[in-house]
Each structure stands twice: as C-alpha cells, then as structure tokens.
Amino acid sequence: MSFALPRFRPRLLDALKGYNRARLSKDVGAGLTVGVVALPLAMAFAIASGLKPEAGLFTAIIAGFIVAALGGSRVQIGGPAGAFIVIVYGIVERYGVGNLIIATAMSGVFLFLMGLLRLGTLVRFIPVAVIIGFTNGIAVLVALSQVKDFLGLRIAKMPGDFFGIVSTLWTHLDTFNGWALAVAAASLAVIVLWQHGGGWLKTARVPVIGPILPFGSKLSSVPGSIVALTLATAAVAAFDLPVETIGTRFGGIPAALPAFALPDFSWGTARYMLMPAITLALLGSIESLLCARVADGMIDDRHNPNQELMAQGIANFVTPFFGGMPATGTIARTVTNVKSGATSPVAGMVHALALLAVILVAAPLASSIPLATLAAILMFVAWNMGEWREFARLRSYRMPYRVTLLTVFLLTVVFDLTVAVEFGIAAACLTFIYRISSLSRAEQLDAATTPRLAGHEGQLQVWRLYGALFFGATKVLENMEDRLPARALVLDLKNVIYVDSTGAEALVHLARACSRRGVRLIVSGLMHQPLDIARRTGFAAQVQQQGEDCLQPDVGRALDEALAKLAQQA
C-alpha cells in the first residue's frame, strides 16, 4: 500500500472561485467585527502569559493572517488562545522569553509535520474525558491567574505553580486595591449582562443591557468586552482612578510593525524545550481542529485537517520571530466570524489587517486600558472555556471515564499541563486496551450446540474466536494451549477482525504446542487482515505443513476434515 503526502492547497484558492463584490462586503464586515473582538483578548492573553500586550496583538496579526490565507477552513480565525496561558507562563517563568520563541517555533515544525504526514484525523481520537479534564483545569488556572489584577494586589512577580500562586495571593490579600476591584467587578457585570441573554442567564431571567438602550439593535451587536473596555478606560482617565494600566506597567504598546529578531537563548536550557514544544503542538492541534469542526457545523462545510495543521505550523514557526506567542484556532472569534456573515478566509485576513491598523493608528490609547478590566475579560473567558456541567454528569459515566477526567483535571491544576496530557493519553490507551481485550473472547462449541461433536469429548475441540487478537488479548490462546485435546483442535477465526504481530506470534506458539503433542490443528475462516498477517508471519504455512486440508474456508468444512481424520485413526 502506497503512502502519498497531502497536497499543499489552502482553502482560500477554492473559496475565491466565483468571488464577487457582495461576498467581499460580507467578509470585510465580518473581519472588522472579529478584529474588534480580538483586540482586548489578544492583549489580555499576552499579559496573563507573562508577556507584553503587543505580543498578543502581533500574534493575532501575523498568525491570524497566515492561518486564514493558508489554512484548511473557510472561516477559522487564528490567534492567541486562553488554553496556552498556563504553558506559556510556565515556560517564560522557568526558561525565559528566548526559550519560549524556540519552543513555539519547534511546535510549529511539529504541527507542520503532523499535517504533512496526514495525522490530522488522529487528533480526533483523543478521548473526550482527556479534553474536558485539561480544558476545565486550564480554565481554573486562567481564572486564578487573574485574581491578582482583579483585586489590584501589589505582587512583583507571580509564581507559575498552583501552590505558589495560592500562597502568594493569600499572603498579599492585605494589599488589595478597592478601586481596582470596583473597576473589575463593574467591567465583568457589563460583559455578562450586555448581550449574553442565552443559556443560564435566560433561564435565570437576568436582564440584558444592550438591546434595551437607545439604538439597542445596533449597540447589542458590539461585543460586551469592547463596551466594558471603553467605559472602564474612559472612567479611569476621567476620574484619575488609582488603578494599574497598560501604560503604568508596560509603558504602552509600540505604534509600529513588529520587527524580525532572533532569540537570546542558551543551549543549556533550550534542550529542555522538547516536551513543552510537543505539548504546545498537541494542544494547538486539538484546539484548532475542534474549532474547525465547530465551524463546519455552523456553515455546513468540511475542513481539511491536514492543510489546517500545516498552516498552523507555519504560523507558529514564523510568529515568534516577530515578537509573537503560540497561536491556534480560536472558537469564540471563529463563531463571531461566522455569525457576522463571513464567506471565505478573506474575513480572517481582514481581521488581521484591522488589528494592524489599530496598532499603527490608535496605539497611544491603549496605555490607559486598566488591567483590572482585562482581568475581568479573562475571568469571563475562563468561565466560558470550561465544560462545568460535565462534573455534574460524572455519575452517569463509568469509573474509567470519571477517573481519567478528574485525574487530568487535578493534574492540570495542581501540577503541570504536560504531565496531565501525558497521563490522560496513557490512561486512555490503557482503558482502550482493556475494553478491546474484554471484547476478544473464545467460545467452545459442544455437543449441545453442535451434535456432531457428541462422543468426541476429550479427543476434539472446536473454538470460535471473536474480536481482535492483539497484545492485550492473547490470554485466550494461552488458556487454550493449557488444555489441548488429545487428537484435533479446530479454530474458527471468521469473527476475528484484526491480528497484530503479538497475536500472530501467539498463534504460532499454539501451532507449535499442537505439533509437539501430536494434535492436528485445523484453522477456518481466515480472511482479510488476519489472513494477510498469517501468511506473512508463517502461521498459515505452519498449519499447512500438516496437510493442505488444515486451512478451510468455514468451520463446517473444518469440522468435516477433523472428524474424517478421527475416523481414519479409529
């Protein structure tokens, strides 16, 4: 069987067929809307990750443009994401920004190779329990990381581990800033009540602000995060409130294009970047492909997962050398893009250009943005990120699912996302092996079900095997070997769907045991993959050494052959 590498064909090429002025108008409108949504999120994600706010903006611009132009989805928006906050902050705190650039670029290489080797579909096999576990864990850590700015605590440097964060927050509670708390609480209230009338808010009959105001039909289309950001910035500037802003902490953001720069790193620490890079690539692939699947359902389309991974890889390789951070597909901005009427990747490219225009024109205004408002925005993002209902539904699932989800969640929160993902995938593999092995069984036919066996007990055995004969299910053959009959053994493999090398070796061992004890082995029902591996491993030839009639197409003919030999020997 030949293996062909996928063609590098961005979805943009197909989407532009039949492109016209009406579609361009829709894409420009959607791109501008998404740009407005992405502006505060990009800065907030960067600050929460221990970077300067422009790192998030540069990522949204460069990665957003590359993902849209080269990706495999028509409407996906790429950029910084909340899921990366925990990993990026840990890398920056432990190894520095220079090594973050190396880790991000390495993850880009891994992502591109995953797409090139057609591994895009394999990401879908990661169990839901693992995804929900680390997603909820990340959401908790994102919210916890924002407590400092939400309360206005005076902390010079936050640690990266859970216990260190909790301890530092507790010991600095007496430094909280009442004005910062008021700004953050008011901002969060505006974000929640502005336009989110669905879900639990609608059930609880919580009022929605946007639509009831003058020009409400137009105002309600403005994202609540932008409204909160505008009002909070204006209030802080007008009343000169004593709260920390982007200007007081970072000196504002540069009103210029990002410049190419090689990282300042040491090989002594760069060698530790392999696992963080793999984690970034794995998480980025999961986030982007899940996001693309959500978008497919909204626009009745089908994305190309391998092309999407290659585009994500290029974006993550290029962006860090221009002052950016890891990027992936972002569900909130992609959904906004779809709901705003996007028809092609042009909308994603417009969103990136809109952010570039903001940097070039309105960068000085960003200096007055209060960090408490950005903390409120991330608190809301963290709440929406988590699948909290899954905790309440755990009782309806089996124990392996519960243990996997809760353990991945706790490991993510308390220890490290890399450890959590490693455990989750290992636990999922072990659970899968156990479940598949439990489906692999051997059923012995007896005189009650097969009257022709009457009178041949102890002389002849007929076994029908089901499932897969792989390294986790060879016990059924070992048990058979321990109690062989005196004269003949018939194996019906018609219902065996797969045999791996370990299963084939177990069959060879069984054939040798039969040969040593003078038991005639007759095999029936070998088809497709089991027949192919039986030939390649020599098992089929070993069976046929006893006679060409020892390989039969079905169990009826195999039983005829066995009974005929017994009659000759009688």
Image (spheres, grey):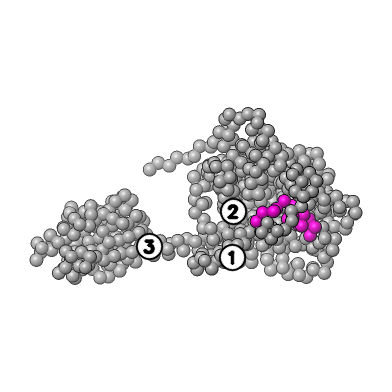
Q: Is residue 187 magenta?
A: yes
Q: Which residues are magenta?
A: 184-199
Would residue 404 be visible to someone looking at this image?
yes
Q: Is residue 420 depicted above or below 3 in this figure? A: below
Q: Quadrant of residue 521?
A: bottom left
Tell whether 300 sits left or right of 553: right
Tell whether 296 sits left or right of 534: right
Nearest-to-viewer mark from 1 and 2 = 1
Q: Position of residue 325 (x, y in %)?
A: 68, 49
Q: Are marks 3 and 1 in contact (CB under 8 Å)?
A: no
Q: Position of residue 26 (x, y in %)?
A: 66, 35
Of the numbered discs 3 and 1, the one sitting upstream in the chain is 1
Q: Quadrant of residue 140?
A: bottom right
Q: CA distance from mark 3 to mark 1?
A: 29 Å
At label 1, the amino acid type is Phe
- Please state which of residues 365 and 544 is positioned toward the viewer in this rendering: 365
Q: CA distance from mark 2 to mark 3?
A: 31 Å
**The N terminus sits in image quarter:** top left
At label 2, the amino acid type is Leu
Q: Residue at x 47, y 60 (%)?
A: 429
Q: Which mark is residue 283?
A: 2
Q: Position of residue 379 (x, y in %)?
A: 72, 58
Q: Residues within 10 Å of mark 2 (few under 14, many from 20)?
A: many
According to the picture, the residue beneath numbered tag 1 turns out to be 391
As helix, strand or loop, the secondary structure at mark 1 comes to helix
Q: Is residue 460 depicted above or below 340 in this figure? A: below
According to the picture, the residue beneath numbered tag 3 turns out to be 439
Would residue 113 be visible to someone looking at this image?
no
